Image: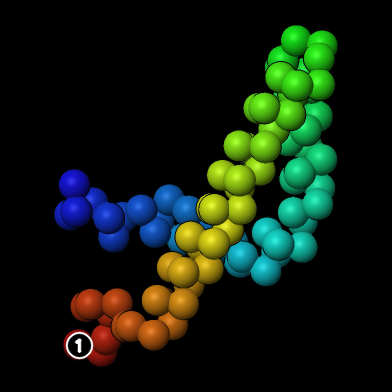
Amino acid sequence: MFATVPHLGRACPGGVGLTTALAVLRSGYVIVGIFTLAAIITPPDAVSMISLAIPMCILYEAGIIAAQIVEKRRHREPVAGAGPE
């Protein structure tokens, strides 16, 4: 399992070239979209909508934090084998 951890950086937004600053700027729109999606998916009551939307917002923010950590590590450590030959 630990052998696949470096590949997780390629799966997150920071790993595919999207900057986390852009994700933070658009987070208001994403949160509105999450609540809209939760309102469509859940039955018509506020409790179930909020109980779905809050964990989705937390996961979105956790993804932004994970992408920031990956970006900081990339700027600190050069990638193995990426140097001049």
Q: Residue 37 at x, y = what percent?
A: 74, 27
Left or right: residue 60 compared with residue 16: right
Q: What's under tag 1, amino acid-wise?
A: Glu
Placement of the C terminus among the 4 image quadrants: bottom left
> Dividing the picture into quarters, in which one does residue 7 lie?
bottom left
Residue sitting farthest toward the top: 43
Residue sitting farthest toward the front: 47
Query: Number of labelled discs?
Result: 1
Query: Considering the numbered disc 1 on the image, is that residue within a helix, a strand or a loop?
Result: loop
Q: Residue 35 at x, y = what percent?
A: 78, 33
Left or right: residue 83 compared with residue 39: left
Evaluate whether residue 32 shows in this view: yes
Q: At 67% from the left edge and 69% from the top edge, which residue is drawn? A: 21
Q: At 61% from the left edge and 65% from the top edge, which residue is drawn? A: 20
Residue that carries the numbered disc 1 in the rendered image: 85
**45 is higher (above) or lower (below) than 77:** above
Q: Residues within 10 Å of mark 1 (few under 14, many from 20)?
A: few
- In this rendered view, identify the residue nearer to me: 20 or 53: 53
Q: Residue 81 at x, y = what percent?
A: 21, 78
Q: At 56% from the left edge and 44% from the top edge, which residue is drawn? A: 59
